[in-house]
Image: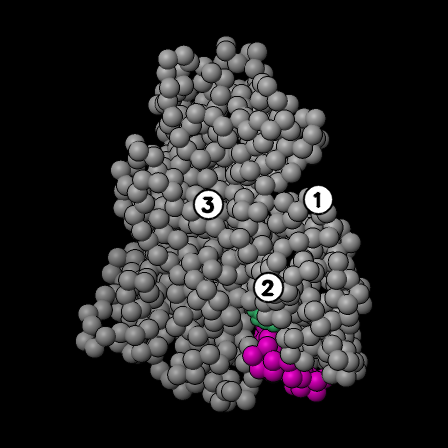
């Protein structure tokens, strides 16, 4: 039996009494140990990061492999967890500082440590101090034992006589030791987000970052997987999975030295952002959220999903609302009768909400009738909607659905009253040519007045319409031509202060309206980070709703996000694919529709209604259960995934045949996560009206053991064909 109390019995330990105590700090989950040690030189090093040791007594005896043992020993690979600029370390520093007097070296020494409980986990705070400069750095680690997730970040404070410049801003470093390392990264573009690609890492650095400021993740997502000794696999092998929680410019660096040691750092991209920190101010690095799995990415994802639902995402354990959006149905062209018809359609579909998208605001020549004007002027468009938003809320009520509304509050069109009134609220340098993205600019969220304005967009809507049931918060432009009149001489702080301002407003909204679900949207998947998701219930993975592309996109995002946070809508993209295929693909995530009845036959409509009911019934499995990725679209021409409710009473298997080859051999799909002793009835659902299942074994009862070992012959040779198979525990 492992005894945890052996390590740091006392909650707090001072430097003076340190010598008499073990110098080991254990940051542990049920599956992983991260062991730190204070070495003879008083600095803090990583002794171990790996599979959990059975005996806690073994942790303090792990020798530090590389220690700077004093005079005569010069070791450049010492695994110092908060190594700083200007020291002797080989690896790039976690923190880079220019002190007020211009000196660039910082050495941090252990001072004290406290461990406290946080919901679901244990928090460790370690205070480090420089001996020459009045600089204090507090390293924070939160370990969630059951979910095997560790969250780390650092706070930096100083009392120098002048400004300290932070050149590197990362959370504590993590060192990993293996024979070889394989990075899987997630990059892409608008409508092709998060494509997975794997490469072997060799000597030197691999950096993945963004410097777009807002809509930060258009081209790459803030998460990665590193397979140790082999590329990351779904069901086997050791894999480190990590993500940076920051809405702005993030960066992760994977650096291998000449002894093949891997150093992982995650934090802010310092490009044009060497932050100026005044005396008495504190700077927090973004959180680095990571997990180490000994059983592949599938287990790691399930652990992250559990952690996210329980401790991170807004209303993570709550119900999610299905909806009908009008964006692709009407675009900007609508009026009250047209929207009332959409609301009726929503009610007929059986979804919970009607979501009104872009185009409801702006008046006169600034009316938002296309994407060139009106953004920033959040007054309802009186010509289109004479009864205002209250009229729409009432109409939705009458139709029997909730009402949700789209906003993009951090942005402005130059063609708007807001821009003409407050050009100084906008990030851009007025002496330069205007450089817009989708005809818009980014409001300067470092400015508290702008933060108030953005908060008021939501607050005013809610005050006028307390019955609004949902928001979609969009963000379409990166920051261009960066300059802030508000920051004056502190321009270097803008990228960071802007991100902090965005986060502060998101927090304010969530605190005032904790019950209101909000979708994080950024022209598709341009925003998908665990900093924002504290304040958002879900995010829009991609504007690409072609179900074939979506299979890949959803497979990718599911590595890091639970299905209940991933919005997926049935649309008219790829009309070659059946409505059934499109709906079945969306049903493995948070289901919605963005399509008009004019684009569906009666049978298709009836099919969709049934699919909505089935999705709702299966919510305990799909939204709140465990997800098992079974067949990868990256490796085959199919995809299969099953979900099992936490009590294992309900389960569902989704299979998608994308583009099978003629006469291709097909393997049975072996389910996972079922109770092997239990018996489950296999029933194919989501069938088109009048269609009969061709699934062999449909209607039969099998043991969980059989379904997991023998499996079902569920894949087919048909193009863009799907099956939804319910497993009903007997
Ligand atoms: C981009 C979003 O991704 C779309 O869903 C839609 O809301 C448009 N913006 C509206 O302008």
Main SS class of the magenta portion in the image = helix
Q: What residue would you read off at disc 1?
A: 489
Q: Is residue 569 above or below residue 510?
A: below
Question: The N terminus is located in which quarter?
Answer: top left
Vertically, is 228 above or below 138? below
Local crowd at mark 1 within 10 Å, few (<14), some, or many (≥20)? few
Task: Tell me: 41 left or right of 695.
Answer: right
In magenta stretch: residue 438: no
Q: Is mark 2 within 8 Å of ligand 1?
A: no
Q: Earlier in the sequence, mark 2 or mark 3?
A: 3
Look at the image and tell me whether residue 516 can be seen: no
Q: CA distance from mark 2 to mark 3?
A: 23 Å
Determine whether, in the image, residue 608 is placed left or right of residue 439: left
Callout in the foreground (3, 1): 1
Residue 721 visible from this viewpoint:
yes
Looking at the image, which residue is at 58% across and 22% down?
130
Q: How far across and how far down the image is residue 86, in percent?
A: 49, 28
State the residue at coordinates (56%, 43%): 286
Segment tinted magenta in the rendering: 322-351
Q: Secondary structure at mark 3?
A: strand
Q: Earlier in the sequence, mark 3 or mark 1?
A: 3
- Residue annotated with mark 2: 477
Q: In the depicted view, which residue is nearer to us: 197 or 610?
A: 197
Q: Is residue 327 magenta?
A: yes
Instruction: Name the residue tied to disc 3.
Output: 252
Q: Residues within 10 Å of mark 2 (few under 14, many from 20)?
A: many
Under 8 Å from ligand 1: the CB of mark 3? Answer: no
User: Is residue 608 shown left or right of residue 364?
Assistant: left
The residue carrying pointer 3 sits among few (fewer than 14), some (14 to 19) or many (20 or more) residues within 10 Å by Cα, namely: many
The residue located at (73%, 78%) in the rendering is 367
């Amino acid at each position: 039996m492992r005894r945890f109390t052996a390590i740091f019995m006392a909650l707090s330990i001072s430097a003076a009494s340190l010598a008499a105590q073990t110098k080991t700090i254990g940051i542990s989950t049920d599956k992983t140990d991260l062991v730190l040690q204070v070495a003879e030189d008083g600095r803090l090093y990583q002794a171990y990061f790996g599979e959990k040791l059975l005996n806690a007594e073994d942790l303090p005896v792990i020798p530090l492999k590389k220690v700077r043992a004093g005079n005569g020993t010069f070791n450049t690979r010492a695994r110092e967890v908060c190594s700083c600029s200007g020291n002797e370390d080989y690896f790039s520093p976690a923190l880079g500082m220019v002190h007020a007097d211009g000196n660039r070296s910082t050495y941090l020494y252990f001072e004290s440590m406290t461990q406290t409980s946080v919901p679901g986990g244990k928090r460790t705070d370690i205070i480090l101090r420089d001996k020459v400069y009045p600089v204090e750095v507090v390293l924070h680690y939160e370990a969630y034992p059951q979910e095997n997730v560790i969250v780390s970040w650092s706070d930096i404070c100083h009392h120098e006589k002048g400004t300290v410049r932070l050149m590197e801003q990362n959370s504590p470093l993590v060192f990993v030791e293996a024979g070889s390392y394989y990075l899987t990264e997630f990059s892409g573009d608008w409508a092709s987000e998060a494509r997975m690609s794997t490469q072997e890492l060799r000597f030197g650095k691999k950096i993945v970052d963004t410097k777009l400021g807002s809509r930060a993740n258009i081209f790459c997502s803030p998460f990665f997987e590193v397979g140790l000794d082999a590329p990351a696999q779904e069901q086997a092998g050791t894999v480190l999975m990590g993500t940076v929680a920051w809405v702005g410019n993030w960066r992760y660096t994977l650096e291998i030295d000449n002894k093949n040691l891997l150093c992982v750092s995650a934090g802010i991209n310092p490009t044009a952002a060497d932050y100026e920190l005044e005396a008495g101010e504190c700077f927090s690095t973004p959180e680095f959220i990571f997990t180490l799995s000994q059983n592949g990415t599938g287990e790691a994802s399930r652990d992250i999903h559990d952690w996210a639902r329980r401790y991170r995402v807004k209303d993570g354990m709550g119900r999610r609302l299905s909806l009908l959006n009008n964006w692709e149905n009407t675009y900007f062209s609508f009026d009250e009768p047209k929207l009332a018809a959409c609301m009726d359609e929503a009610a007929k579909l059986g979804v919970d909400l009607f979501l009104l998208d872009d185009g409801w605001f702006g008046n006169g020549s600034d009316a938002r009738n296309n994407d060139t004007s009106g953004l920033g002027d959040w007054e309802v468009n009186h010509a289109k909607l004479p009864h205002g938003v209250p009229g729409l809320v009432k109409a939705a009520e009458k139709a029997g659905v909730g009402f949700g509304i789209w906003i993009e509050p951090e942005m402005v069109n130059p063609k708007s009253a807001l821009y003409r009134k407050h050009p100084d609220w906008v990030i851009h340098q007025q002496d330069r040519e205007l450089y817009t993205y989708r005809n818009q600019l980014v409001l300067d969220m470092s400015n508290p007045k702008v933060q108030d304005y953005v908060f008021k967009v939501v607050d005013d809507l809610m005050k006028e319409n307390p019955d609004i049931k949902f928001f979609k918060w969009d963000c379409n432009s990166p920051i261009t031509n960066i300059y802030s009149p508000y920051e004056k001489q502190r321009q270097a702080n803008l990228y960071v202060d802007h991100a902090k301002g965005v986060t502060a407003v998101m927090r304010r909204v969530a605190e005032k309206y904790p019950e209101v679900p909000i979708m994080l949207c950024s022209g598709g998947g341009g925003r998908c980070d665990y900093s924002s998701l504290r304040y958002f219930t879900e995010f829009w993975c991609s504007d690409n709703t072609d179900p074939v592309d979506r299979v890949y996109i959803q497979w990718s995002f599911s590595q890091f996000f639970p299905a209940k946070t991933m919005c997926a809508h049935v649309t008219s993209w790829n009309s070659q694919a059946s409505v059934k295929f499109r709906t079945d693909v969306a049903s493995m995530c948070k289901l919605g529709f963005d399509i008009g009845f004019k684009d569906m036959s009666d049978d298709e409509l009836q099919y969709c209604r049934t699919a909505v009911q089935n999705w709702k019934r299966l919510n305990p499995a799909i939204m709140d259960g465990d997800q098992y990725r079974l067949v990868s679209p990256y490796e085959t021409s199919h995809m299969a995934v099953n979900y099992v409710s936490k009590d294992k009473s309900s389960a569902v298997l989704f299979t998608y045949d994308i583009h099978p080859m003629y006469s291709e051999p097909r393997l049975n799909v072996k389910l996972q996560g079922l109770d092997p002793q239990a018996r489950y009835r296999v029933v194919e659902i989501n069938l088109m009206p009048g269609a009969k299942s061709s699934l062999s074994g449909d209607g039969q009862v099998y043991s969980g053991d059989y379904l997991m070992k023998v499996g079902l012959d569920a894949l087919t040779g048909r193009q863009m064909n799907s099956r939804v198979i319910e497993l009903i525990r007997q």
